[in-house]
Amino acid sequence: MDLENIRKNIYHSYNEEYLKKILIDFSNQTLDTNNFNIENRNINKVLNSFFEDLIYKAKSKNGKYSPKEIIDDDNLLEEALTYINEHKNFYQQKSNEANLRDFFFSSSMVGKVTNFNPVIARKIYEKYLPYENATIFDYSCGFGSRMLGALTSKYNYHYIGVDPYEELYKRLLFFSKWIKDTLNNKAIAEIFNTGSEQYISQLKEKVDLSFSSPPYFNYETYTSCNTQSYIKYNTYNSWLENYVKKTLENIYKYTKENGLHLVNLEDTKRIKLLNDWLDIATKVGFTLEEIETLSTRKRYSNKNSNKLLVMRKS
Ligand SMILES: C[S@@+](CC[C@H](N)C(=O)[O-])C[C@H]1O[C@@H](n2cnc3c(N)ncnc32)[C@H](O)[C@@H]1O
């Protein structure tokens, strides 16, 4: 099989006009905030075309290799393609590349990281902040999905995000400019290349709602750079103390009186982060208002559901 060709075509590539149309359509779409159904699937093409290479470099503990490690290694790539070939009843996509992408999602050989859904992100913002110009703080930007949700809303949010990963930070800047140039709306994006445990004094009492899907200790690895929370604080307890607690203390200070703190979490086999996050947030001063369940695409092996904790500074 022609491995070089597969390597070239594995990354989605779309015509820019087509991507702009998807973005504009999504921005004009009215979303039903009474449920978290994913009412637009096309918008993921936009995220893929800006972030797929970085997503493929990252690795989750769900599998042995990152997608990029498989793509780059002749033996691993052959092994994956042989497996796909031997399981044709399961892998029924039109091309080798498309089957391989399915394989990245379903095989225990691969640990592909998840990315929060941009439709759900926008629904969350529009449900809890149904008014113009509110300020949102994303304490862990990741691969752009929450920023995309915020900047495409009719409410023209002011989105502020942080992420310590430098290459990703630059990509986020590029992406936010592309969204702004395409939509030409009044939304604002501001991104800081730092960890959320660092205090940013200019954000004091500026935020109406904070929301993210933070790293779950070392469950997913994004880059080997030592600014990553689980590398800086390498036991679960020191990570809770130095990353989670500091982050929540900062968020509390950034939040306006009566403002909201939201977090998307999922327990893993080893880590029961939900209770720990709630416990620390409560000690910092937030009050729990509700816990919602989010529907996300799951591997068959994963039985936990994603929870959205909603807390208030009162
Ligand atoms: C958004 S989180 C988790 C992604 C998750 N799987 C999801 O569903 O979206 C991933 C990001 O956390 C970032 N990160 C790592 N350490 C951080 C820190 N100290 N503060 C803020 N973000 C951090 C990584 O650079 C990465 O981009």
Image (cartoon, rainbow, N blue to C red):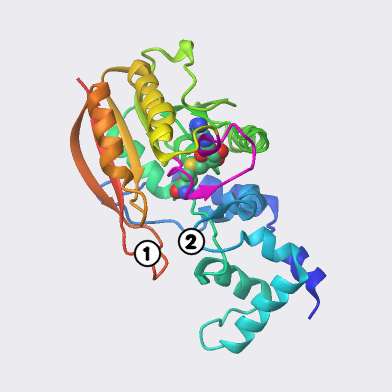
User: Does 197 appear above or below 278?
Assistant: above
Q: What's under tag 2, amino acid-wise?
A: Asn
SS at mark 2?
loop
Q: Residue at x 45, y 31 (%)?
A: 139
| Depth order, front residue of 87/149 | 87
Place residue 14 in its image quadrant.
bottom right
Q: Is residue 73 visible?
A: yes
The amino acid type of the residue labelled 1 equals Asn
- Image mark for residue 62: 2
In the rendered image, is residue 132 in sight? Answer: no
Cβ atoms at labels 2 and 1 below 8 Å apart: yes
Question: Mark 1 falls on what kind of element?
Answer: loop
In the rendered image, which quarter contains the N terminus?
A: bottom right
Was residue 230 drawn as part of the magenta stretch in this picture? yes
**Disc number for residue 302:** 1
Queried on whether the Cβ of the residue with tag 2 lies below 8 angstroms from ligand 1, the answer reads no
